Amino acid sequence: MREHKKRITVKDVALAAGVSTQTVSRVMNKFSYISDETRQRVEAVVEQLGYRPSTLARSLIQQRSYTLGVVTFGLKYIGPSRTLNGIADKADELGYMLLMKKLDNFEANGIDEVIESLLARQVDGIIWDVPEVDENCAWAQGIESLPVPIVFMSMEPKPGYSVVSMDSYQGAQMATQHLIVQGCRQIGHISGPLDWWEARLRLQGWRDTLKKAGRQVSEQQWEQGNWSSASGALAIEKLLARYPEMDGVFVANDQMALSVLGEACRRGIQVPERLAVVGFDGIPESAYFYPALTTISQDPQLLGGQAVENLVDMIRAGQENETVVAQSVLIQPTLIIRESSRRS
């Protein structure tokens, strides 16, 4: 009788290598944050046992599921939640379903597990809508390959990566220049958390615009918040205490700008005559602040939609065996002038 050779499974490899089946999967899919020692040991066992992933498993990845994976973070903030809405609308328009995963932290193991979970459900591509901070930054920079295309959002553009972002630097320049044109001589800034790439860009845009106009810039002229209205209230209180001559302020998002307007009212500071205020985001509610808020309007709906379009183009190119070219798209913001800064 002919003897059938037992097929080697991922469990056999894990047992021989002394690791979990999940670790074997990570090594086979070239995930980051696997030590060189572990990777080499698993690869040696794979070669020794002659393990090959089943053709069925591989084919499942290659077939179209018309499902996009979305990894997001910070849905308590208005910007990310509106971006997700744009992703959902465009995906529905193009005939794709969404499978969403929310990161609560940026630990390496958690990041890899999220990607593995999406791949296990045969998504056609992934949108990574997570700020480039902590270990997420290292993960994004260290990624070499995935079996499906991936589009990054809110990340610094890099060669070889498909990235869709708003031009925060340009928006900050527009806001600061507007305050200069309105006659403000002492312009402060309330930034977002500086581990966020967008917050650093907005701070730098404010600095560079003041320097270009021949203005002095010092550390006493700005304060850091965390995007929340509560942090904006604390930041403007500190800023007014150490920079009382400030007559204009660029605030890195509308939620913090709301508390700036509230604190000005509480202190009897007239806006915009004594303190002109410009926010960033262009949330619909900003038109109904008192006074109505001048803001840098970015369109998260457009941002999310553009990310989906880029990803679908990459998926189609891969299916048709065409070269997938990574591209970076910076969407330009607009300045909406309202009563909080209009002096003339």
Image (tube, rainbow, N blue to C red):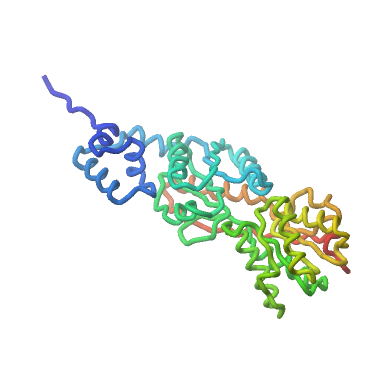
**Residue at position x 24%, y 41% in the image:** 46
In the rendered structure, the answer to whether residue 187 lies left or right of residue 107 reads: right
Name the residue furthest top: 1
Name the residue furthest left: 1
Q: Which quadrant does the N terminus fall into?
A: top left
In x, y percent, where is residue 160?
Answer: 45, 58
Q: Which quadrant does the C terminus fall into?
A: bottom right
Q: Quadrant of residue 96?
A: top right
**Relative depth, front residue between 10 and 194:** 194
The answer to whether 176 is drawn above or below residue 319 in the figure is: below
**Residue at position x 48%, y 35% in the image:** 65
In x, y percent, where is residue 60?
Answer: 40, 34
In the rendered structure, the answer to whether residue 46 lies left or right of residue 303 reads: left
**Residue at position x 33%, y 50% in the image:** 35
In x, y percent, where is residue 267?
Answer: 85, 59
The answer to whether 94 is drawn above or below residue 195 in the figure is: above
**Relative depth, front residue between 278 and 317:** 278
In x, y percent, where is residue 75?
Answer: 63, 43
**Relative depth, front residue between 138 and 150:** 138
**Residue at position x 77%, y 61% in the image:** 278
In the rendered structure, the answer to whether residue 33 lies left or right of residue 260 reads: left
Name the residue furthest front: 241
